[in-house]
Image (tube, coloured by chain):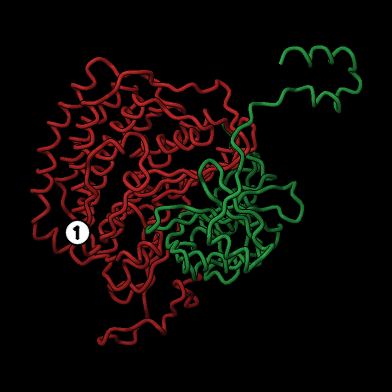
Chain colours: A red, B green
Amino acid sequence: MKELLENDRDFYGQEWNEVEKPSTYLDSNELILNMGPQHPSTHGVLRVILKLDGEKVLGTECVIGYLHRGVEKIGEHRTYTQFAPYVDRMDYVAAISNGLGYCQAVETLINVEAPPRAQYIRTILTELQRIASHQVWLGTHALDIGAMTPLFYTFRDREEILKVFEKYCGARLTTHAFRIGGCQWELYEGFEKDVKKLCDFIEPKFAEYEELLTTNRIWVERTKGVGILNGDDCKALGVTGPLLRAAGVKWDLRKAQPYAAYSKMDFEIPTGENGDTYDRYMVRIKELYQSLKIIRQAVDNIPDGPIMAKVPKVLKPPVGEIYHSIEAPKGELGYFIVSDGSLQPYRMRIRPPSFVNLQALDKMVRGLLVADVVAVIGTLDIVLGEVDR
Amino acid sequence: MAAAPVASKPAVPASAAAPAKPAIPPKPAGPTPQPWDNEFIHRLKKVYGSGIREASTYLGQNYVVVDFSIVDEILSAYRDDEGFDYLVDLTAVHYPKREKAEFDVVYVLYSFAKNTRVRVKTQIADGATLPTAVDIWPTADWLEREVFDMFGIRFEGHPDMKRILLPDGWVGHPLRKEYSILQQDKEWVQINLGIPPSGIESGQ
């Protein structure tokens, strides 16, 4: 902070003198403003240093790492099985997706495929988790912009999803629902009925959220044209997930490189046009409906059979390395695992979507107002547990 | 598994170390990397010769190992000629026992048009630098900073080569193999967090 004040340092290559100044610019000093790490709108412990001209943002710098626990280092000191619960604690609002990515990555490494029944269970739970994650996003994002009601609505409905998780595996948030090679638990009696009931309960609720926001004048004014990121920028910055789709790029790993039971499901990839905050909102809302569509198909067609593949009790993958990624609610979640043939991974690299997406913040907020920074951080849908690992 | 090791065990206990090895039956051979070739690799080999060390596929995933001196040219070629427009990940792996090539630096690339991934790997010595990939894919910015933070590998030409997850004043690079899981920069912790030198109780 002090350094920033003293000399006009880099804001990613753009010197203050080169910044295009508005015609009304009176050669006054720019203001360095610190936001976070303890700020309600940063969704955790994100610190952003803003460089302002009045209320106009000239540049930002993110300071992250407050939640760094060294997950990758821990991964090198745990066996493959022991490390599985740790991944739940990265993106803690979408723990099941993290677990799915990890289990599939290790399965790729040991060349095992989970049985079809497990694939269906995984698909259903992961899609439920996607809905829950989007609900947390919608509630907090709307709260940041000033709409308080959606928070209560979304958390009320998310509760029903968490109840299903709790009934299935005993945990609500950091579930550790899957195991390498399949699932630990058979479905409980009446799971299908519960999920169908949940789908019927929750579908009209999405319309409720939309009723509150989609045509709400304040919401539209605050989000339309804010934080624009076009398709080429997204690709260059490695931004994936709903952000990429809102920019008009029809790309989803569930379709591009299907895993679990997604190849057998019929669903659409919703896309936007302008790549602004409003489009990202619309894309996520449409994804909620698509997730429901997938769950309904899957729950009607769960095949019989075992839920665990034959996996050795002591996991010793052969020497080699693999990269495997899935479409997490926030974007491409990848695991790069290097095995040296021992019990523990030699290297456990996690490619978190939030970390890479957050990098786009600077590009998105330049020229906007401080209040829009809050909107843009919300629309990025970051979870600091995953950014810092 | 049964016959051979049991017979040899009581016979020669003194010189067990050397001859015991062949007695262990070979494990069922896992998949091995297979040579991988396509037109583009062929062209690269023609231009760079031995600079392309290896092109293989393992479990259906393709990778190329290239010399560190040409890595930026290879990456540019992949983006411009082959349409790999998305740098998925950039990371490193530490092999302290490999002399003069302690680090693997791995670039995971993806092409939206072709829907394929490829990994470009290069080996560099401890203390050596690599040219930055920020001008090829801006996303390399934070990824390179993370590699520097965790491994101490510097990228030349990077706009802001500093730590990203750990605090600026921290000493050491935690994902190196010699860095113990219990290790921490005691001085930094003491000054900044006011924790006595006896340290924090570790749960590890």
Front residue of A132 and A15 = A132
Position of the C terminus of chain B by quadrant: top right
Q: Position of residue B98 (x, y in %)?
A: 74, 49
Chain letter of disc 1? Answer: A
Q: Residue at x 72, y 48 (%)?
A: B96
Q: Quadrant of residue A326?
A: top left
- Amino acid residing under circle 1: Tyr
- The answer to whether one can see residue A372 in this image is yes
Q: Is residue A36 left or right of residue B82?
A: left
Front residue of A331 and A13 = A331
Q: Is residue A195 left or right of residue B56?
A: left
Position of the N terminus of chain B by quadrant: top right
Q: Is residue B127 left or right of residue B148?
A: right
Q: Quadrant of residue B129?
A: bottom right
Q: Is residue B40 above or below residue A128?
A: below
Q: Quadrant of residue A154?
A: top left
- The answer to whether one can see residue A70 in this image is no
Q: Residue at x 35, y 44 (%)?
A: A328
Q: Which residue is mark 1?
A: A278
Q: Position of residue B185 (x, y in %)?
A: 63, 49
> Number of marks in the image?
1
Q: Position of residue A238 (x, y in %)?
A: 41, 59
Residue count near mark 1 (Cα–Cα under 10 Å), binned few <14, some 14–19, many ≥20:
many
Q: Position of residue B108 (x, y in %)?
A: 50, 54
Q: Residue at x 86, y 25 (%)?
A: B19
Q: Residue at x 44, y 80 (%)?
A: A15
Secondary structure state at the residue bearing disc 1: helix
